[in-house]
Image: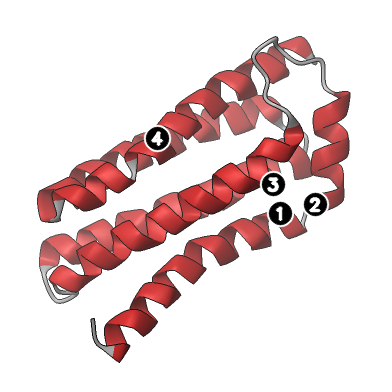
Amino acid sequence: MNLKNILVLLLLILIPLAAGFLSSLTTRQNQAEQYIEFKQPSFAPPGWLFGPVWTILYILMGVATFLVWKVGAANANVKTALIIFGIQLIFNMLWTYLFFGLNLRGVAFVEIILLWGLILTNIILYWRIKPVAGILLLPYILWVSFASVLNFSIWRLNK
């Protein structure tokens, strides 16, 4: 891999990591405190687990996006896939703000369902361009599926 590809790979990994970091900045103190204070379902993971899981998922997103980008950014299918990736990343950031920042857990649940659909679309588009890129996003949709159930449960238990 040449220097340009290494730099693009690093950039494409840093973008989702930065998105996650930025979304947590608005609610960092609230997140840990709120999560502990919630009435939680029996399957709720410990709060410390979220940071490492999201870090891994963001890295996988960056690598998958790099593999798609490498096919050729001028390719119309690649452009569409990258646009959908950007949109889903914005939805990913928005969820944290809705759930923790604004305490709109019902709205956050609707939003995470939309996010799930965008992730599925992203997986399909990436898969068509570079199957391994789609595979790299499977842990992301699995985690967001779990997070959706957790979001719904916390919302209902804490009304």
- Residue highlighted by disc 4: 141
C-beta proximity under 8 Å, tags 1 and 2: yes
- Of the numbered discs 2 and 3, the one sitting upstream in the chain is 2
In the picture of the structure, the residue carrying the numbered disc 1 is 24
Q: Amino acid at mark 4?
A: Ile
Up-down relation of residue 116 to residue 158 (above or below): below
Image: 109 above or below 157:
below
Which amino acid is tagged 3? Tyr
Query: What type is the residue that disc 1 sits on?
Result: Ser
Could you say which quadrant of the image residue 147 lies in? top right
* Residue contact at pointers 4 and 1, CB within 8 angstroms: no
Q: Do callouts 4 and 3 mark residues in contact (Cβ within 8 Å)?
A: no
Q: Earlier in the sequence, mark 4 or mark 1?
A: 1
Q: Are marks 3 and 1 in contact (CB under 8 Å)?
A: no
Residue found at x 61% / y 47%? 52
Badge number at residue 97: 3
25 sits left or right of 34 in the view: left
For label 2, the residue is 28
In-front residue for pair 56/28 = 56
Looking at the picture, how far across and down is residue 5, in whole percent? Answer: 28, 81
Q: CA distance from mark 4 to mark 3?
A: 20 Å
Q: Tell me: 101 left or right of 116.
A: right
Q: How many marks?
A: 4
Check whether the beta carbons of the residues at disc 2 and disc 3 lie within 8 A of each other: no
Residue 21 in the image, given as x and y percentages of width and height? 65, 61
Q: Residue at x 80, y 51 (%)?
A: 28
